[in-house]
Image (cartoon, helix red, strand yellow):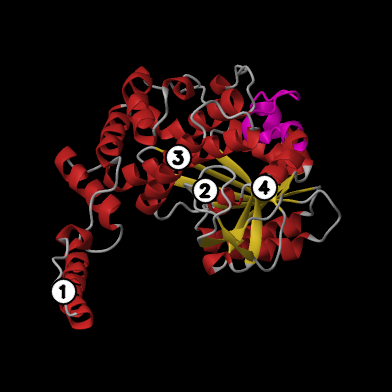
Amino acid sequence: MNTRPGNKRNWKKVEPANAPLGDASESRTAPKPSSFVVGEALEYRVARLHLFMGYFVRRGAPIYTVAALDRATDLDVLATRYIEPFERQMIISECKSGENSPLDRIFWLSGVKQYTNANEALLVRKATKWNIKDFAKECGVRVVDLHRLSEMESALGINEDEWPGISDREFFNGEVESWNASLRSNRRFWELTLTLSSEIRWEEPFAGANYLLSQLRLLTRAFPEYPKDSFHRFLFTESIAQLSLFVLRIAEQCHDLSEKDRDGFIRKGLTYGNLDPKYAERILESAYNLARQSVPHYTNHVVDLDRQVFSMPEPPGTYELIGFLEILLRAYPACLILPQVCDYILMERFTKRREMRRVLRKMFPQATLNVSIKHNACPKVRGNVGFNRRMSSVY
């Protein structure tokens, strides 16, 4: 489900993310997310195709300017996966079922492909002349006709009644009104919803992992029991699925290091991000010295400042995340499909509350998830985000 486009973001005061439900306190600002819209049937069909090709798929992903001030455009379908040896592949797709000329879309896709660093860009539409397809290839775009789409679905063994995960248009069509009502009435979720819907490149894995872990901890405090609202269950699902993708991004950057070096690399990244630790410590030391001099000057009192205030502590969950990543790497190459499997299982069992159909074997016919991921890694994740026993049972 994508969000309704708009040129300007609507900035309003919102209540703190850790405030109890119904709290009217307003202490910080965040942009109001666009309303959810269902989208065209062809987008779901293309999303389903990529799901069965083994990709982590999202629909209607908006692209914003800095601070989400303006909406530049959106991606109909965004598909991401990892292949050996930790190489990321990304496909963006534009889906057009109408009679519009394809040439302007070809140029547009070529530019968006470069912006998103995608490996491939697809324009899915009705039958297209050979010379236009040739021109598209020169621009780095591939045109996929509807009849070719049907051939690919047949080759992958996709049945007409199989709409797994986020490709289930019927489910979203039945939930869109209640989701928009929940979003309007719970402004505390605006920031998280906007962040999840607009993430398209996963380029800052440490910042992304820290943010999503903190949001998951807040969600579990807000919903200590099983969430009754499907929108709240969707926020859990989306946060965990995207967190798993950020974890793979971290693994991509450090899988070739020794375990000791990986430990240091991850601790540094989670604590300082892209900032050099020595420069960060210099900045904090300067801030400490400036504060020690300024406080007596303005108050005429000598105050013993806490040095720990001017330090960068490791974020909570660092130890668990490192342990989780080590378990994943020991399950290589099965760990490469972790985001896709998490996304499908959580969407079907948790968000939709449905029995899973046997489609994982179709999506990953040659892959097997290592059982150690379930028994060893899941407890680390549950403890990290604060799931209680009842909430954990759904996983």
Quarter-of-image position of residue 14? bottom right
Residue 331 falls within the magenta-colored stretch: no
**Residue to which mark 2 is pinned:** 90
Q: Secondary structure at mark 3?
A: helix
Give the numbered dot on residue 185: 4
Q: Residues within 10 Å of mark 1 (few under 14, many from 20)?
A: some
Residue 154 falls within the magenta-colored stretch: yes
Q: Is tag 2's residue or tag 3's residue first in the polypeptide sequence?
A: 2
Q: CA distance from mark 1 to mark 4?
A: 45 Å
What is the x, y in percent for residue 226? 55, 26
Residue furthest bottom in the image: 297
Q: Nearer the viewer, mark 2 or mark 3?
A: 3
In the shown orientation, is residue 260 left or right of residue 73? left
**Residue to which mark 3 is pinned:** 216
Q: Is tag 1's residue or tag 4's residue first in the polypeptide sequence?
A: 4
Can I make out residue 139 in this image?
A: no
Give the numbered dot on residue 292: 1
Quarter-of-image position of residue 68? bottom right
Can I make out residue 324 in this image?
A: yes
Q: What amino acid is found at the position of numbered circle 2 in the picture? A: Met
Q: Mark 2 and 3 residues: CB-CB less than 8 Å, in contact?
A: no
Q: CA distance from mark 4 to mark 2?
A: 35 Å
Q: What amino acid is found at the position of numbered circle 4 in the picture? A: Ser
The answer to which of 74 and 314 lies nearer the viewer is 314
